[in-house]
């Protein structure tokens, strides 16, 4: 069964973005470890920006992170995946077997959105060795994959901090 985390986005001026991302991580990890098969306890997370909502699957294990959103031909408008790493990483992403265009947001351990990159959907028949690789400009602790353009449409800009509700 897929683990789901509910996300709510709320608009605030960048200057008042002082909340910490660690609460989000604690909630995400807590939600992951406390799930029993067939049950889920949704948690709310606020993007300190424009009103929006999203459902995030949580990938905490290496196996979950390797699969990511692959083998999907569609993704609900406000759905995506939160990748949680135990330490800062510079891991690159690719779109192997992912047929939905995505935008990835790289987030540091303090919860600041460092960068977003639009990623093209894999074209059927394209060999894995020919797929583009999408690398962050700097190390990050968390990555969030959403439908392409979600961050821009919801005014979740570089510098936005995330907090747990």
Image (cartoon, rainbow, N blue to C red):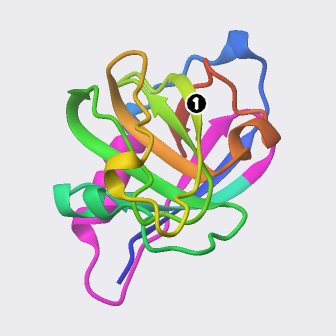
Badge 1 marks a residue whose secondary structure is strand
Q: Across the whole image, how many numbered discs are drawn on residues?
A: 1
Q: Where in the figure is residue 59, as x and y percent of width and height?
A: 32, 58
Q: Where in the figure is residue 20, as x and y percent of width and height?
A: 46, 26
> For residue 47: magenta?
yes
Identify the residue at image location x=45%, y=60%. Answer: 126
Identify the residue at image location x=55%, y=46%. Answer: 165
Point out the stretch of residues depicted in magenta.
24-52
Image vertical order of residue 58 relative to residue 72, above or below: above
To which quarter of the image does residue 44 belong?
bottom right
- In this image, 77 relative to 111: left or right? right
- In this image, 22 relative to 113: left or right? left
> For residue 159: magenta?
no
Identify the residue at image location x=60%, y=54%. Answer: 7
| Viewer-nearest residue: 9 or 95 | 95
Label 1, on which residue? 116
Q: Quadrant of the N terminus?
A: bottom left
Q: Where in the figure is residue 141, as x and y percent of width and height?
A: 32, 31
């Amino acid at each position: 069964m897929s683990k789901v985390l509910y996300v709510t986005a709320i608009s605030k001026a960048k200057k008042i973005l002082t909340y910490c991302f660690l609460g989000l991580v604690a909630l995400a990890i807590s939600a992951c470890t406390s799930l029993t098969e067939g049950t889920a306890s949704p948690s709310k997370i606020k993007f300190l920006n424009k009103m929006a909502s999203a459902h995030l699957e949580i990938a905490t294990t290496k196996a979950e992170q390797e699969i990511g959103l692959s083998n999907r031909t569609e993704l609900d408008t406000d759905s995506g995946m939160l990748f949680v790493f135990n330490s800062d990483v510079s891991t690159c992403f690719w779109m192997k077997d992912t047929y939905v265009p995505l935008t990835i947001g790289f987030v540091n351990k303090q919860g600041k959105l460092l960068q977003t990159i639009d990623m093209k959907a894999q074209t059927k028949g394209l060999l894995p060795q020919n797929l583009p690789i999408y690398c962050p400009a700097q190390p990050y602790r968390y990555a969030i994959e959403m439908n392409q353009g979600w961050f821009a449409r919801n005014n979740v800009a570089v510098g936005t901090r995330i907090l747990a509700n």
